[in-house]
Image (cartoon, grey):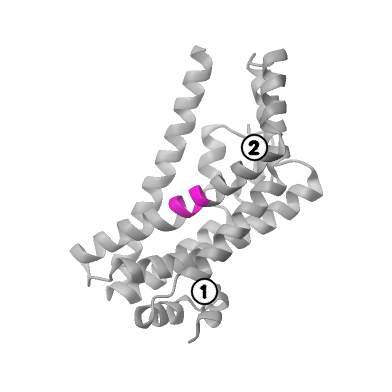
Amino acid sequence: MNGLGNLTSIFFNPEKVATSVAEKPRWLPAFVIFLVVMALVGYGSYNYAIDTQYGVAAKVGEGGKSQEVYMAFLKSPAIRIISSIVQGISMFVTFVLIPAALLNSIASIVGTPVGFKRMLAYMSHVGLIIAAGQIVRFLLIMAKHTPDVRLSPAAFFPNLALFSPMMTFLSSFDIFSIWALIAVVVGYKELAKMKMSKAVLVVVSLWLIGVGILVGLVVLRGLFVRKV
C-alpha cells in the first residue's frame, strides 16, 4: 500500500496500514497533515476558547480590569499564531509521540520488538483520526459560536461545567477518541505480533492512565483556583 493510501485506510482498515508501515515506516506526510490541521483548528477556535476562559475566570472572581487587559493581549494576532503552532506541536507530542514511545517500549517486553520509527509512523496515521475529530469539532464550534461542543457521553449532561473533572472524564470517551483507540489496538496487535486480548489490555490500560492524569490535573487546577 502506498503512502497516500495509508492516509485514508487508517480510518477503516488500520490492519493494512500497520502492515504497510512495518515494511516502509513513513511518518512525515501524516505528521504534516496532523500538525497543519491542529494548528488551523487552534487558530480558528482560539478567540472562542479565550472568551470561555475569561467567563470561567469571572465566575470564580478572577475578572476585573487586569484580566481584561491580559485577555486583550492574548487575542493579539502574534500570540494567536504562536499559540496555534504550540497547540499543534503539543497535540502531536501528547497523542502521537509519547504513546508511540510507550507502546514501543512495552512491545519489547511483552511482544515482538516493533522499532520506534515503525510505531511512530503508525501512531502518526492514527493521529489523522484525532485530526478528523478536531475538524468536526471546529465546524460545530463555528455553527454554535461556542467551544462547548460535546461528542461524548457528556452531551447527555448539558449542565455539566465545561472544565469540571467529570466533564474531562466523559469527554475522553468521544466518538473519535474511541475510533482512534480501536485503530491503535488493531495496529498494535499486528506490529507487535501479539494476541488481540493482550493488545487490548496494553492499549486500554495506557489510555485509562492518560485519562486519569487529565482528570487529576483538572482536580488540581480546581483546588488551586479555590485557594487563590
Helix, strand or loop for disc 2: helix
Q: Quadrant of residue 184?
A: bottom left
Q: Is residue 65 left or right of residue 16?
A: right
The amino acid pointed to by label 1 is Ile
Q: Identify the residue at horizontal 60%, vertical 50% (top origin).
A: 152
**Magenta-drawn stretch, dominant element (helix, strand or loop):** helix
> What residue is shown with label 2?
79
Find residue 57 and report its horizontal and vertical position in percent: 64, 22
Q: Is residue 157 left or right of residue 171?
A: right
State yes or no: discs 2 and 1 in contact (Cβ < 8 Å).
no
Find residue 210 and report its horizontal and vertical position in percent: 40, 46
Q: Can I make out residue 150 in this image? A: no
Would you say residue 2 sits in the magenta stretch? Answer: no
Q: Residues within 10 Å of mark 1 (few under 14, many from 20)?
A: many
The amino acid pointed to by label 2 is Ile
Rounded to the nearest whole Å, what is the CA distance between mark 2 and mark 1?
34 Å
Q: Identify the residue at horizontal 34%, vertical 72% (top origin).
A: 189
Q: Quadrant of residue 198?
A: bottom left
> Residue 61: which disc?
none
Q: Residues within 10 Å of mark 2 (few under 14, many from 20)?
A: few
Q: Which residues are magenta?
A: 89-94
Total numbered labels: 2
Find residue 103 and report its horizontal and vertical position in percent: 31, 61
